Image (cartoon, rainbow, N blue to C red):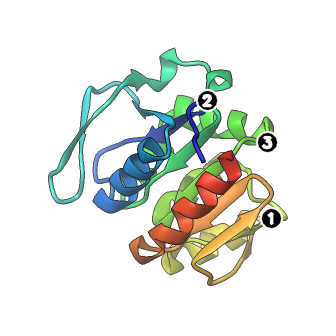
Amino acid sequence: MSLSDKHVAILAEDNYQELELHYPRLRLIEAGAKVSVLGAGKHTYHSGKGYAVGVDDDIAEVDPADFDAVVIPGGMAPDRMRRHRHMVDFVRALSEAEKPVAWICHAGWMAVSADIIRGRRVTSFASIRDDMVNAGGDWVDEEVVVDGHLISSRVPDDLPAFCRAIIQALS
């Protein structure tokens, strides 16, 4: 199955979790998708361990309508991402268009800030469970949760199931 007609955004900010950004990026490229790493004002971001990722575009300069999905990696980056109005608005716009919005680990914070989980079944890293519940989500402890166009996972060990769900949603 080829995703050659799909364009996927992956959000980047400092302190991203390495596997949660690069694993989906490489899997989606392997499946044929065009993948763009989007940031907010910088050309390069660094993971919690110092690994750099270059940005293809500034999120303030792209149109959400040009994308078929967004992937939000975890680590502590989502706490920084949610401070950028353009990032939050981008996630909300894709959700409103019912395009796949996928997050893993602490990236559930972005779904909370975009106010897209009320009444939806979701998961995340266990420590932000209360945030997800308080935002109206029905939090469950499963490796991947798909509720309509929302796809969520807990930790790096869930990445194979997470990526399969994203690819399936785009197929």
Q: CA distance from mark 2 to mark 1?
A: 28 Å
Front-lying residue, 70 or 170: 170
List the residue tagged with mark 1: 120
Q: Give me the residue at 37% from left, 49% from top.
A: 26
Q: Secondary structure at mark 1?
A: loop
The single residue placed furthest to the left in the displayed view is 50
How far from the left and from the top, in percent, is residue 50? 14, 52
**Which mark's residue is nearer the viewer, 1 or 3?**
3
Label 2: few (<14), some (14–19) or many (≥20) C-alpha neighbours in 10 Å:
few
- Of labels 2 and 1, the one closer to you: 2
Decide if residue 139 is on the left or right side of residue 58.
right
The reply to whether the C-beta atoms of the residues labelled 2 and 1 are less than 8 Å apart is no
Kind of residue at disc 1 = Arg
Residue type at numbered disc 2: Asp
| Mark 3 surroundings within 10 Å by alpha-carbon count, few (fewer than 14), some (14 through 19), many (20 or more) | some
Please indicate, yes or no, whether residue 84 appears anywhere in the rendered image: yes
Report the residue that reaches farthest toward the bottom: 141
Can you tell which mark lies on residue 5?
2
Amino acid bearing label 3: Glu
Dot 3 lies on which element?
A: loop
Going by the image, does 116 lie left or right of 2? right
- Residue that mark 3 sits on: 98
| The furthest residue to the top | 61
Where disc 2 sits, the SS reads loop
Q: Position of residue 126 (x, y in %)?
A: 52, 80
Q: Is residue 70 above or below residue 64?
A: below
Distance from Cα at disc 1 to Cα at disc 3: 13 Å
Q: Residue at x 33, y 52 (%)?
A: 22
**Residue 117's x, y, as percent?**
74, 58
